[in-house]
Image: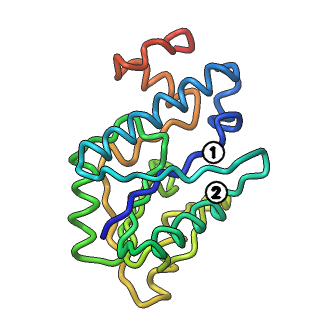
Amino acid sequence: MLAAVVPMKSMELAKGRLAPVLDAAGRRALARQMLDHVLETLRQAGLPAVRVASGAGDNSDLNRDVTAAAQAVQAEGATDLLLVMADLPYLSTDDVGALIEAGHRSAVVIAEAKDGGTNALLLRPPTVLGFTFATHRPSADLHAEQARTAGIEPLFVRRPGLARDIDTPADLVQLVSDHPAYHVFRHVA
């Protein structure tokens, strides 16, 4: 059984690097809109039960929250975990399908962000790796190293919808230009 989890910082902390161009309410609105898009895309891809892993407050730790979610879905009987970050407004059902397909060929599938981070993982079993998000090093390489240490050759899925997250003001400007659903944020462009 495949379980899907979307990690999400608390709305109060989301998209902090966009503070120079968006006020707190704008950052919350953007984070909510991207989260809704990711959740809807996962549902459209045939994953009706999607869990959001979110820290409850200011001290949330993404790695701790994701580890707890992975342990929970495994305890509930999940054999595979599809972990997809919440800030992927270009994500499509084809991107989700590519991750799932790659999971038939490796127990660790990594979707690398444009900056070397990790925007999605498919893991079998859900707790096969420790999580190394937000370590100030490219987490995609760290996740790949962990897989190899565990004797698993990871597969990388490189697709624009999985690589293009929204972290910087330049990312937001491009999103507003590309995507009509985000024109409400055009005042930053």
- Answer with mark 2 or mark 1, whichever residue precedes in sequence: 1
Give the residue type at disc 1.
Lys
Asked where in the image residue 100 lies, by quadrant, the reply is: bottom left
Left or right of 82, for residue 186: right
Q: Quadrant of the N terminus?
A: bottom left
Asked if labels 1 and 2 touch by Cβ distance under 8 angstroms, the answer is yes
Looking at the rendered structure, the secondary structure element under dot 1 is: loop
Note whether 15 is above or below 48 in the view shown: above
Q: Which mark is residue 46?
A: none
Of the residues shown, which amino acid type is indicated by label 2?
Leu
Q: Position of residue 104 (x, y in %)?
A: 22, 73
How far apart in space, not on screen, are marks 2 and 1 (Cα)?
Answer: 7 Å
| Placement of 27 over or under 76, stated as above or below | above
Residue 65: image location, x then y, percent = 63, 60
* Residue in the picture at 58% in, 33% down: 168
Q: Position of residue 123 (x, y in %)?
A: 40, 72
Residue at image point 41% right, 63% down: 121
> In terms of depth relative to the viewer, which is nearer, 120 or 112?
120
Which mark is on residue 9?
1
* Mark 1 crowd level (few <14, some 14–19, many ≥20, 10 Å Cα): many
Q: Residue at x 72, y 52 (%)?
A: 60
**Residue 12 in which image quadrant:** top right
